[in-house]
Amino acid sequence: MDRINASSDALELSLRRLAAAVDSIERAAERRMRYEGQRAGAEEEYALMQDDRSRLAVELDAALDRSRAFEAANVEAGERLEQAARSIRQILERMDPAAS
């Protein structure tokens, strides 16, 4: 009977150790799944940030191009206004030479 009790005790001890090992594996699997979920979320967030960065870079380039075009148009308009002012002065001088 002692052998049966000893075998039964050993079996029970082995089953408890097995149950503890299974619990440990389940906890590890749950942690891993949470980690993977967080990692996937972080990777998705990073990808969205990269997309935003690329879009903003394109928008910045377009804004700089528009700014340069406005600056060039402003310079051209200034030159044309100066030329128009000179022409008006010349016409006024021809009409009234004493006004010079």
Image: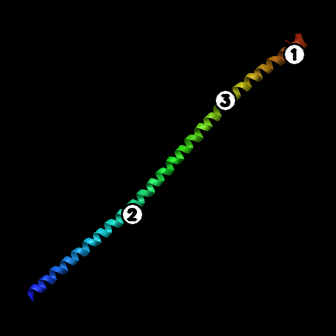
- Percent across and percent down for residue 98 are 89, 10
Name the residue type under label 3.
Glu
Name the residue type under label 1.
Leu
Q: Quadrant of residue 84?
A: top right
Name the residue type under label 2.
Arg
Q: Which numbered disc flags the more N-terminal residue, 2 or 1?
A: 2
- Percent across and percent down for residue 73 are 70, 29
* Residue beneath the point at 51% across and 51% down: 48
**How far apart are the two marked residues, 2 and 1, measured between alpha carbons?**
85 Å
Residue at the extreme top of the image, as rendered: 97
Residue wearing tag 3: 71
* Residue beneath the point at 12% across and 86% down: 4
* Secondary element at tag 1: helix
Residue wearing tag 1: 92
Q: Quadrant of the C terminus?
A: top right
* Residue beneath the point at 42% across and 61% down: 37
Residue wearing tag 2: 34
Residue 35 or residue 84, whichever sits in front: 35
Q: Quadrant of the N terminus?
A: bottom left
Task: Please state which of the two labelled residues, at mark 2 or mark 1, is closer to the viewer.
Answer: 2
**How far apart are the two marked residues, 1 and 3, measured between alpha carbons?**
31 Å
